[in-house]
Image (cartoon, helix red, strand yellow):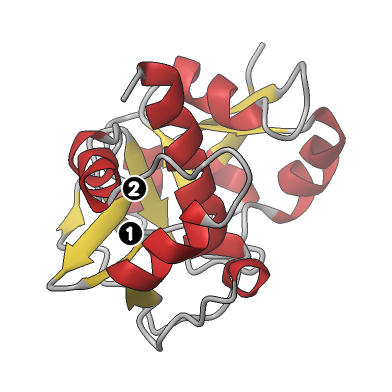
Amino acid sequence: MTNTQRRRLSKLMSYLLRHRPEEAGLTLDAGGMVPLEALLAAIRQRRGYGWVTEDHIRDVVATSKPPRFRLEGDRIGARYGHSRRVREIDPGEPVEPPEILYHGTSRRAVPSILASGLHPRGRQFVHLSATREAALRVGRRHDPQPAVLIIHARKAHADGLTFYAPTPEVYLVRRVSPEYIEMEQ
């Protein structure tokens, strides 16, 4: 499998497992999982994906950076980022965050975020990035010239917010109040 094929397959898996399983005839269980065999069949039915095998899916699970998927026996699911309600995903043990984290977003969302803070908006957690570059990548999904917000994570943590880090690049928190957010200059 080429890097381009791996990236395309990863994006499709994320789309189906996080956002639109019904589009492919999949039904997530309460934990956001589906049978691996069902996901494979759904992917292979899509135009341009007839080449995909179970080994290709397992390769994407094993090599995704940051890790986006989980395999449990013969079932597969997304680790985080669901836009629909699933049984709460275990984010792992709480961690002490670095001094600063970042959040990439559209420019039009900035006034609202600075006024009311960051909220999960249909997800279980707010997603923060460990690096400015990662935040820019996330923000470009919403705006070709995204805004990057600086999150004073260590101060928020000291004031009682609980942070999780399912991967070294992604931090999760239930919400972030405006006093911990500033616009990057």
Measured as percent of width and height from the top left, residue 106 is found at 77, 33
Name the residue rendered at 30%, 54% in the picture: 69
Quarter of the image for residue 93 reads: bottom left
Q: Secondary structure at mark 2?
A: loop
Residue holding disc 1 = 79
Residue type at mark 2 is Arg
Query: Dot 1 lies on which element?
Result: loop
Residue that lies at the very extreme toward the bottom in this rendered image: 30
Q: Which of the 4 quarters of the picture holds residue 181?
A: top right
- Label 1 amino acid? Arg
**Where residue 16 sits: x, y (%)?**
54, 60
With respect to residue 77, does 109 lie above or below? above
Residue in view at x 31 percent, y 61 percent:
162
Q: Nearer the viewer, residue 60 or 69?
A: 60
The Cα–Cα distance between marks 2 and 1, rounded to whole angstroms, is: 5 Å
Locate residue 66, reporting x and y percent: 30, 36
- The residue that label 2 is drawn on is 68
Q: Are marks 2 and 1 in contact (CB under 8 Å)?
A: yes
Left or right of 15 in this view: 133: left
- Mark toward the start of the polypeptide (2 vs 1): 2
